[in-house]
Amino acid sequence: MKFDTLDKKMRVYETSADLCVLPEVAMVARLDGRSFTRLTKERCHFEVPFDEKFRDLMVETARSLMTCGFRVVYAYTESDEISLLFDRREQIFGRKLRKLNSTLAGEASGRFSLLLGQVATFDCRISQLPTVDLVVDYFRWRNEDAARNALNAWCYWTLRKDGQSEQEATRRLHGISVRQKNELLFQYGINFNNLPDWQKRGVGLTWESYTKQATNPVTSQEQVATRRRIRIDYNLPMRDDYSSYVRRLAHSTT
């Protein structure tokens, strides 16, 4: 059988299940670290409940995903996950989900592993969001998840550092309200509201324009050039203010 005939025959089995995101539908990728609880607590021994070194690894991985060939307008990271909002006009890989998921997971895994100095892996899934309101809801969801996880983590590890076992700390927190969790922390001298915003709300990465002096390569004359760079926000707004923040970014992609 000639190669061209064989190639055409076998290619069908590789691409028959390909699904593509429809034009003009917003895409948000969410990447999650695989077995990162074991990685952070047992293999690398990062500080609990939060470690700035781990945060910086996640931020730098998110930055890499914004600059590796995709049209990403907003990256958001909290805990061991990264969410990416793509420009609605993004056409890379023909918007094929298989290619997007595999490439993004590979890029994140490779970059994080190089930064960490040992193997770490991410998975990826794409949310297809047809309206700006749904894009806002998605990032509100992850933002609220960050706040909930931060409160639970601070309560759990405060009890653990006070000598309680895993079972005792878990049992102590089971079924108690947000107010009760805040009161528990206050008993240990911790005001949750005063903790760093990045722990409670995550970190956002956006593009910003700036000007700089440059030399025209043709005329050798000095001129002002406009460039783009990534801005990292460790103090994201909350609730409705965050909704407005995301809405502006989502509208900028249309």
Image (cartoon, rainbow, N blue to C red):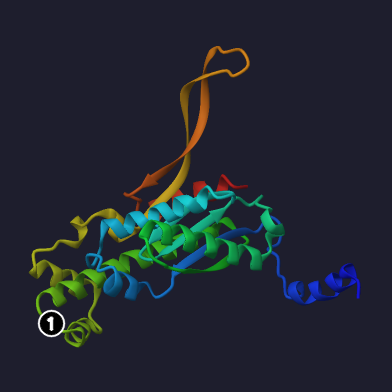
Q: Amino acid at mark 1?
A: Gln
Residue visible at 46% across and 69% down in the picture = 121
Q: Badge 1: few (under 14), some or many (20 or more) residues near its Cα, within 10 Å?
A: some
Q: Is residue 221 left or right of residue 208?
A: right
Image-quadrant location for residue 5: bottom right
In the image, residue 122 lies at what x, y percent? 47, 68
Name the residue tied to disc 1: 164
In the image, residue 52 lies at what x, y percent? 27, 56
When the figure is inspected, residue 213 is found, relative to residue 54, above or below; the finding is above
98 or 86: nearer the viewer: 98
Residue visible at 18% across and 74% down in the picture = 180
150 or 215: nearer the viewer: 215
Residue visible at 28% across and 59% down in the picture = 199
Image-quadrant location for residue 56: bottom left
Q: Secondary structure at mark 1?
A: loop
Residue visible at 9% across and 68% down in the picture = 188
In the image, residue 68 lies at what x, y percent? 55, 50
77 or 186: nearer the viewer: 77
Q: Is residue 149 visible?
A: yes
